[in-house]
Image (spheres, rainbow, N blue to C red):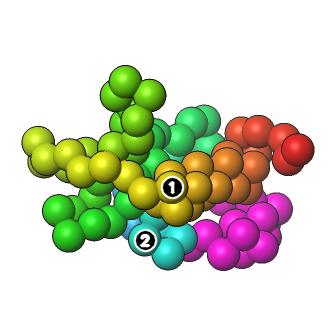
Amino acid sequence: MTPAIAARLKERDISIAAEAKDYCMFVRGNCAALAQSAGERFTSIGSSGMMTPNGLSYLIWRNGEAWLAAHGREVAAAAEQVEAIRGFSADLEVALGLKEEN
């Protein structure tokens, strides 16, 4: 990871929770996402999720409604949860250099 990426992560209060060959798990609060790397740069992030009593739940949309899905269970997502996951994803993309900041 480059010093610039590390600085952008710190600015956005995003931490590395786990590392493996070619992957890192990033977290902020109860939000989490995996990112794929190639050397010191990152190539993509997977779906962002949120830790819930059912485990890591991913934001999905069904008929225009937001849901958190985990282990075959789905619960309606609150507006605050949707905002937290979307904000985390956007910040992570910018921090990893996958997207320019708006």
The nearer-to-camera label among 1 and 2 is 1
Residue positioned most to the left: 72
Foreground: 30 or 82?
Answer: 82
Q: Is residue 63 visible from the viewing direction of this image?
A: yes
Instruction: Give the x, y percent position of residue 74.
Output: 20, 46
Kind of element beneath mark 1: helix
- Percent x, y for residue 21? 40, 50
Residue under label 2, please give it.
Answer: 30
Quadrant where the C terminus lies?
Answer: top right
Q: Give the spatial CA distance, label 1 vs label 2.
A: 15 Å
Q: Quadrant of residue 3?
A: bottom right
Q: Is residue 38 above or below residue 30?
A: above
Crowd rating for badge 1 (residues with CA inside 10 Å; few <14, some 14–19, many 20+): few
Per the image, is 92 magenta? no
Q: Is residue 23 visible?
A: no
The range drawn in magenta is 1-16
The residue shown at (33%, 44%) is 67
Q: Which residue is mark 1?
A: 79
Quarter of the image holding residue 92? bottom right
Instruction: Report the amino acid beneath label 1.
Output: Ala
Where does residue 58 sit, x and y in percent of width and height? Answer: 34, 47
Q: Secondary structure at mark 2?
A: loop
Q: Is residue 18 left or right of residue 80?
A: left
Q: Is residue 76 left or right of residue 34?
A: left
Tell me the kind of residue under disc 2.
Asn
Q: 64 and 18: which one is in front?
A: 64
Residue 81 drawn above or below residue 44: below
